[in-house]
Image (cartoon, rainbow, N blue to C red):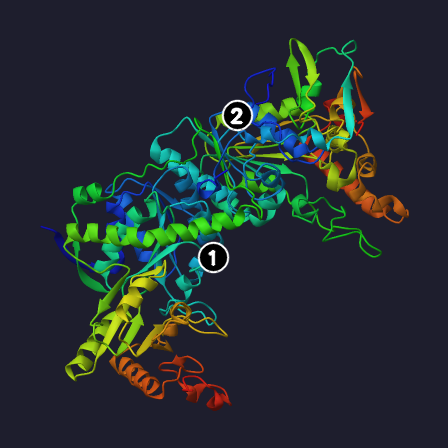
Amino acid sequence: MIAKEKSGEQELFVSGHRACHGCGMALSVGHILKATGKDVIVVTPTGCLETFTSPYGYSPWRVPWIHHLFENGPSIASGVAAALKAQGRIHVRVLVIGGDGATFDIGFGALSGMLERGDDVLYICVDNGAYMNTGGQRSGASPMYSSTTTDPAGKISPGKSQMKKDLPAIIAAHGAPYVATASVAYLKDLEKKVKKAMEYHGPRYIQIDTPCPSVWGFSPDRTLEIGRLGVQSGLIPIIEMQGGMLTNVLKIKKKIPVEEYLKSQKRFSHLFRDGQHQKEIEKIQALADINIQKYGLLKDVEDKR
Amino acid sequence: MQETEVLEGSEAVAFAVKACRPQVISAYPISPQTHIVEALARMIADGEMDSEYVRVESEFSAASVISGASAAGSRSYTASSSQGLLLMTEVLYASAGMRLPFVITGVNRAISVPISIQVDHQDTISLRDSGVIQFYVESSQEAYDTHIAAFKIAEDPGILLPVSVCMDGWILTHSYERVSFLEQEEVDRFLPPFKPKNFLDVNDPKSWGSYAEEDVLMEFKYSIHRAMQYGKERIKEIFSELATITGRDHGGLIEAYRTRDAEVILVAMGSMVGTIKEAIDKLRSQGQRVGLIKIRCYRPFPFEDILDNIKVAKVVAVMDANFSMGSEGALGMDLKAKLCGRRGAPLVLDCVAGLGGREVNEKRVLEIVERAREVEESGLPLDEPYWAGLRPEILPEGAENDRQGKIG
Amino acid sequence: MKITLGAVVKGGTSLNYKTGSWRDQRPVLNIELCKACGVCESVCPDGAVHLVNEAYRIGYDYCKGCGLCAYECPADAIQMVAEEK
């Protein structure tokens, strides 16, 4: 057995998982479980997280964990929550940690049902904006003008021509008591939000921006850096909604132009290749500016200017 | 003294489910299943029953909720029908793989298109390969009794598989029959609380739903098959244990009806069996040696029990209320696959009977027996299954040359 | 090894799979420069960095060599060096 000295308490998500180098998703999970503590049952729908943590006989999960199918994470969680209630195991809570494909697309109906019923589940979407487990296909979470393998940039296409689905708003509209976004670039904020979400009962949602070196196309040591650029550009707003109202935002320290974010990743490289995509870049900048205005992401001084 | 009441088949099922004390029930409406979950909802609303009742947004979630609940260690139940059962397909395969012992009532109804609420077995037969144990019942009483047995069978440590009790829509779910009920204490003695060895437990964290490859995947599949094969004897034991309590013996995996010296044996399942028995009685009174095998347990397939009862038969006429397009009906295929190459095996006449709600009446049963006699005389199997009661006159041009039902 | 019922496995067993073999860049921590701030531990996606006797250590059993710790270290105390194979 491996003699491992630990800096803190016993880890709930241990080493030996098979995530790619610099995986933002793997990084987020350790912090999520640090915040929840051990009395949780985790449901993970099919996707990267499921694949890299489930080779038979090698599980990094030190909390009870279940992967069932791709589109039923929320309803498996509802069933677990119902069972816990029936058994009187009230100190145990239910957590879903699933990717954006499972959350935004294939499991969306089940998620809506879980939210509408008010089931006591914290749903965490580790969002990397495409189907990474199958090599990076377009999802409802893919950002505008990103190139994915099923919506690639080409001679006549600038990549995905639709906006990312505004899932936090849709979930808030279901009446979920706590909805937040977070980023692996701001791990303390992430942990704080998970802890806060655990104080609520009913359906709660946290969407974490988890940059993916392998498919976004950047060096694996830059996972947090890319996350920071996304947040500081305004493209990834970090917000909190309680009772459907916007209650808190992570202010941008120093606003950067979206180009800085886009240029850092291969999935947007087509926008800079031939100088023909100024319009698309402007549109992405407009999306960032709308976020900044809508959520008040700039410090007050800058807001007024 | 058992309490007896005349009530709707759906309600009888709901009473059986209530007596089994499921901790979690999920519900989604679809005809002709809906009355079952409605009856359970009323019992809960009136405080007569203590279960978590999850009103899901689809059958996919209905099956998923009880899968999650079962993995968390709760006895769980749902019911569905037709398209709803097909929508559950993926969940049922996965849950059988995880060895989750919940119970589903599969109320039989045809599959679209054309959309129809007529009864046939295409829906549950489409799930035959999933690893879910399947029972088919003939009456509301049998439905009541089989549901109580179903939970015990599902939860048997040597089985641990989902169980589906299949019952014909409308004919059973919506007709009124006299049904006898067990006392709650009797059910409690027969069916102790569900205490699985594996469940989602924070004090002993385990992982469910691994990724496996070619080095072990085949063994996992084989294990399910093995649990089914072991199940054959265990199911019979559980059925007879229940029969001693109820005083009602519906049979084991099959019910053999007047088969001992029968030259022609019909094989069928579901509510059409009652009509067939009456037709057989009539033929017997005319001196014809005809019998019936009613399939009670379709998966695992009770081949050994069938074989024991067809030893002297010349022709076995299988009545399938389902069809595998481009091939044959499921029961016929199962039986022929097992008979093939056995010395002295009877000929099999494949009939499609009761598909899409087409009535199976005495006349039709007699036609099938007559056709069986023709097969017996010719000594040759059919080219193509016989679609009993098919109306060739309304088919598009050219159907007159079809080989359907032709001998040799 | 016998297969388990329903493929249910014990949690924490991935420790038996050493992902260190994936590494082609090795992070080397200069203890002189280290301010023991804990960023390296916090940003490691593989749980490979730990505090041992009040000093941070990189566990090469699991470190895949992504370089996140080196990039994020505010004291520039971690250097990535090519792994000798």
How far across and how far down the image is residue C42, in percent?
A: 66, 21
Q: Which mark is residue B60?
A: none
Query: Who's the residue at 62% across and 26% down the image?
Result: A190
In this view, B343 is above or below C32:
below
Residue closest to the far front: B343
How far across and how far down the image is residue B24, in percent?
A: 35, 42
Could you tell me the amino acid type at mark 1?
Answer: Leu
Residue A57 in view in this figure? yes
Whether discs 1 and 2 lie on one chain: the answer is: no
Nearest the eye: B249 or A139: B249
| Classed neighbour count for the residue bearing mark 2: other residues with Cα under 10 Å, few (<14), some (14–19), many (≥20) | some
Residue hosting label 1: B87
Chain of the residue under the numbered disc 1 shown in the image: B
Disc 1 to disc 2: CB gap under 8 Å: no
Residue B171 in view in this figure? no
Left or right: residue B283 compared with residue B76: left
In this view, B367 is above or below A102:
below
Residue hosting label 2: A36
Chain of the residue under the numbered disc 2 shown in the image: A
Query: Who's the residue at 29% across and 53% down the image?
Result: B233
| Classed neighbour count for the residue bearing mark 1: other residues with Cα under 10 Å, few (<14), some (14–19), many (≥20) | some
Question: Which element type, helix, strand or loop, lies under badge 2?
Answer: helix
